[in-house]
Image (cartoon, rainbow, N blue to C red):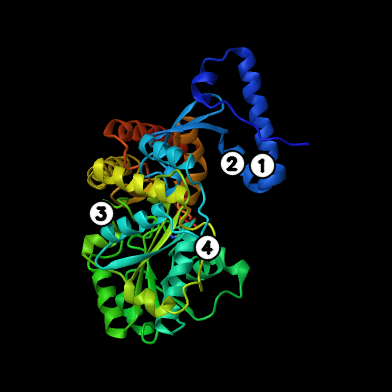
Amino acid sequence: MPWKAQVLPSKGAERLTSMTTPASEQQTALFDEVYTAYKEFVNPPLARFMKMAGAGVELETRGCRVYDHTGKSYLDFCGGYGVFTLGYMHPRVVAAVRAQLDRIALSSRVFFNAQTAALAKALADLAPGDLKITFFSNSGTEAVEAALKLARLSTKRTHIVSTFNGYHGKTMGSLTATGRGVFRDSFRPLVPEFDHVPFGDLDALERVLPGAAAFIVEPVQCEGGVIIPPDGYLRGVRELCDRHGVLLIADEVQTGLGRTGYLWGVDREGVVPDVLAAAKGLSGGVIPIGATISKTEVWMNAFGSSPLLHTSTFGGNPLACTAGLAALEVLMDERLVERSRDNGAYLLEQARRLHRSFPDVIAEVRGRGLVVGVELTHEGYGGVLIPQCLKRGLTVAYTLNQQRVIRLEPPLIVSKPEIDEAMSIFDQALAQSREKLGALSAV
Ligand SMILES: Cc1ncc(COP(=O)(O)O)c(C=O)c1O
């Protein structure tokens, strides 16, 4: 057999930091082996780009930190693009999953499964208003895809409205709803009968809404550059959808489960959508999961007489649902939603302080809870800033739709001293970027 499953050192960080000279050769050999495999078998251009940015091989993750193959520690303010709400490897979630693994890993699908039932019930308790029935899947885009199909079938209409600059995933339906040309254009023709309107603009929405099946919207456009809509927008959306008999789908894949300082992003305005898509942090960053939660009437209209029209082999598997239940318990017990609001306000204040120090590099800082966007005056600064942060032990990333915006999206368990540490590194990286690039004219 030319290949074999390779077990890397499980306590990589501690082991590798205590290594002497031969270890550094081992470290280099490990990096070269993994990098070469990425370059040949995973994604050649991305591998080169990641190497240039200074990414190592991750060997261990704990709390808010990632440790690379040299034992170096990184404070993670990228947070797996919103996945690690509980930090990495939360012990309660890991223990619950370990125990479940000894009993049933994947479901037979022929029998009822207790974990699936329990998580669906917990979600009905925690979801806004009367959202009650959950379809489980394995990712954010699948959760959105299910929501779109549910809306079409339930209303017997086909037209879907979404927002420019929104991000809903990359499978065909979700991609069609996504509002960034560069992701969509290469895959035309996309799904027909989709329209986009400007985010935050109720007049534009009302013009296209009559006759639509659904309007899909994020409470905050996270990948769009952390764009926060005007106050009252979601309430206005709800009213318009009610007036025209259109379903409101809240894409809470990233904003859900405490990220914005509310359990759900829609809670801030007390809005109850007809369908809600969740994923990312739902299973505590331990097992992938997606969930589409809908009102009973909406679900019954769509699937009441055809329960197998939309299915997923792995959706709702016992491991993911066990992780989900444990993650929800931790979210509540550790009061992480409140923590997100408090520490989010602190992070925003610190980032705004940096804006005042670097007005030539930072154009604007905005955020809600623990998702903060730092808009740069010039896209070019990001290319230096991100590697400079990495070099100093901090991970940050662009938002997917807006490369001029750097997201600060740490786990909700982040502490104020960790925020201070991250902002001190960010400060040094900003200074270095300015020194390297000087004043760039705005793009
Ligand atoms: C709001 C939103 N919806 C959907 C998705 C797609 O999720 P996934 O990458 O798990 O398919 C994302 C991912 O960033 C997202 O932020």
Q: Earlier in the sequence, mark 3 or mark 4?
A: 3
Per the model, the C-alpha gap separating discs 3 and 4 is 30 Å
Q: Name the residue: 28% across, 63% down.
A: 266
SS class, disc 2: helix
Residue that protrudes farthest toward the bottom in the picture: 211
**Image quarter for residue 153?**
bottom left
Q: Which amino acid, mark 3?
A: Tyr
Up-down relation of residue 416 to residue 130 (above or below): above
Read off the residue under disc 1. 38
Circles 3 and 1: CB distance less than 8 Å? no
**Numbered label attached to residue 262:** 3
Q: Which amino acid, mark 2?
A: Met
Q: Earlier in the sequence, mark 2 or mark 3?
A: 2
Q: Earlier in the sequence, mark 2 or mark 1?
A: 1
Per the model, the C-alpha gap separating discs 2 and 3 is 34 Å
Residue neighbourhood size for the residue with mark 1, other residues' Cα within 10 Å, grouped as few (<14), some (14–19), many (≥20): some
SS class, disc 1: helix
Please state which of the two labelled residues, at mark 2 or mark 1, is closer to the viewer.
1
Read off the residue under disc 2. 50
Residue that protrudes farthest toward the right in the picture: 1
In this rendered view, identify the residue nearer to me: 423 or 414: 414
Per the model, the C-alpha gap separating discs 2 and 4 is 33 Å
Read off the residue under disc 4. 312
Per the model, the C-alpha gap separating discs 2 and 1 is 10 Å
